[in-house]
Amino acid sequence: MSKREEFTTFINALKAVSPTITDEQRIGLLRQAGQQYSLTIDEATEILKASGLVVGEGVDYFEVLGLSAAEVQNQSETDIATRVEAAHKKRYSASLRAGARIRPDGRTEEQWRALLNQARDTLKDAQKRQEHLTTLLSQEDPHESEFLAPEFIPTETPETASESISSTNKQQNSESLSSVRSEITSAPTISRFDVPAEMVVILAGEFLMGSSEEDANDSEKPVHPVYLDAFYMDKYPVTNEQYKVFLDACPQWQKDTIPIDYHNGNYLRIWHRNNYPKGAANHPVVNVSWYAAMAYAQWAEKRLPTEAEWEKAARGGLTGKKYPWGDQIDTTKANYGENIGQITSIGEYPPNNYGVYDIVGNVWEWCLDEHILDFYAASPHRNPVAGSDITYVLNNFTSLKTYRVLRGGSWMSIPRYVSVAPRFRFTPSHSINNVGFRCVRSASL
């Protein structure tokens, strides 16, 4: 029996038990087809379609319309109806223009339009909308499902590129409605819609970490799936002004009092004693060691991001892209290559799709992890951290001596280093004029 026949037999057996599957189960079956049966996505999709399995139970109507549950929180019924109606009209019109093609999700355009109508009617009705939210919230975490096999993940093709925003919304919705069981508990947790000031929420879920680019080095390989619990990340790198508040509160970390073990002699080099340069209040603080960045983060009741958290936030929901905005370098999107010739103030370049600013370029950013060259080859799937576990690092950071990870490149970097995958390293005492940091906080959603 061929692999195709084996998969067909398996699907028919599944249908005999349950003729209806959720969309998450459909995705899981596609992954399973690739991992266990060596089938392409097109082959597996064809078999699923021929089987007559119905995809419908558990459909997220917010995702169908390209919305998120968070978008309608605290809005009036009139505003919700207007937003839903506009989203429906846009997608319904696009479907009419598409003709009779089979969509990448296996539905016909006619089936898709019927689903769009169901989504509109459900979300415009307050009672139905609440019932739908309750149903979504009660669903099993798809990442625990027996159907999911993370080694095989459908990738974007030119045919599906126009729907990348929809795919991102789908991931965000399913992640935000999942029950998050946080394994990173060392920092304070906050309720779902109480996002801290000047931070953005990065929702729980899986992404592809690493690079397969020709110029990628071995430490960036292989590309591998990583699941992260939800977290909040600073919108911007920590600024001189913010860092001065920390120094005023913690004089032991001031320029003239910091122990020599915690820096290399260049700590806050451009500062005059405890004052940053005139006109640089909104510049990212630089010449800070990993030790000092860790101390600031703890004082702020936050922590440094893990390397995986940093990369997921940097990618902004895009899969397989080189930069936070796509595959082409762009001088209007980041400060790099000495195009400006100096560090710029935060927020002068547009944010990525997660609302994170300056995630590449301007200044390199410290991460919490130890730098281990071959870590990706044996990286845990869920909440990976290289070296010691998070709790140990937070409690003992001043005694650690191993190399720490830096990400994102700086105003001086060539284009390769302002992409989302390259990894760099310094000793934790290293202080230099193009290295800064931003913080994260664990989230309970």
Image (tube, helix red, strand yellow):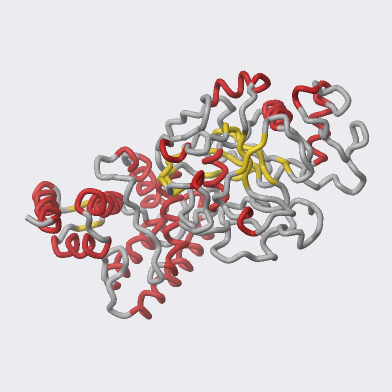
Q: Quadrant of the N terminus?
A: bottom left
29 left or right, relative to 72 = left
Q: Residue at x 74, y 54 (%)?
A: 412
Residue 91 vs residue 279, the one in the foreground = 279
Residue placed at 33% from the left, 43% from the top? Answer: 142
The image position of residue 105, as x and y in percent, is: 30, 63
Whether residue 296 is situated above or below residue 356 in the rendered picture: above
Q: Residue 246: image x %, image y %?
A: 79, 30
Residue 248 position by quadrant? top right
Name the foreground residue: 84 vs 305. 305
**Which sits in the foreground, 96 or 118?**
96
Give the residue drawn at x 31%, y 38%.
Answer: 144
Q: Is residue 332 left or right of residue 178?
A: right
Q: Position of residue 322 (x, y in %)?
A: 54, 58
Counting labels gives 0
Q: Residue at x 85, y 45 (%)?
A: 281
Residue 59 at x, y percent in the picture: 32, 54
Q: Which residue occupies the foreground of this view, 112 or 382? A: 382
